[in-house]
């Protein structure tokens, strides 16, 4: 019973942010996972394959973003609060890292 309460308490405290070099999965300010922008091939709403899941809600299908990776590893599923804003920030950073600096 205590484990179930702990999971329900901890789950909404998982947060996602786009850094200048990586997508960071945080729990209460501590970085749990970093996915380098250089390893992200594309961002999608649709899932294909068996993913690595990082959720912060129980029913996150309406918030789901899938990060497909260049390295061929499993795709990463995240559930940011506003997936369209997060996706635009992520794609802007991906373009910025892909274009050569002048």
Image: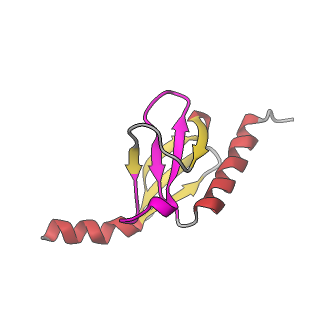
The residue furthest left is 1
- Identify the coloring: secondary structure
Task: Verify whether residue 71 appears in magenta.
Answer: yes
Closer to the camera, 80 or 99? 80
Q: Where is residue 18 in the image (x, y as percent from the top left)?
A: 60, 53
Question: For this view, does 73 lie left or right of residue 85?
Answer: left
Task: Verify whether residue 10 appears in magenta.
Answer: no
Q: What stretch is highlighted in magenta?
A: 54-80
Q: Position of residue 57 (x, y in %)?
A: 39, 66
Quadrant in which the N terminus is drawn: bottom left
Q: Quadrant of residue 27?
A: bottom left
Q: Quadrant of residue 2?
A: bottom left
Q: Residue at x 69, y 55 (%)?
A: 88
The vertical placement of 21 against 73, above or below, is below
Q: Which residue is drawn at 68% across and 42% down?
A: 94
Quadrant in which the C terminus is drawn: top right
Question: For this view, does 62 lie left or right of residue 42?
Answer: left
Q: Where is residue 96 in the image (x, y as percent from the top left)?
A: 75, 43
Q: Position of residue 38 (x, y in %)?
A: 61, 35
């Amino acid at each position: 019973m205590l484990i179930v309460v702990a999971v329900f308490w901890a789950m909404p405290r998982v947060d996602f942010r786009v850094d200048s070099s990586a997508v960071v999965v945080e729990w209460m300010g501590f970085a749990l996972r970093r996915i380098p922008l250089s390893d992200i091939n594309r961002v999608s709403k649709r899932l294909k394959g068996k993913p690595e899941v990082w959720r912060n809600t129980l029913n996150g299908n309406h918030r789901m973003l899938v990060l497909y990776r260049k390295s061929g590893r499993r795709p990463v599923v995240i559930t940011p609060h506003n997936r369209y804003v997060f996706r635009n920030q992520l794609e802007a950073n991906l373009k910025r890292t892909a274009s050569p600096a002048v």
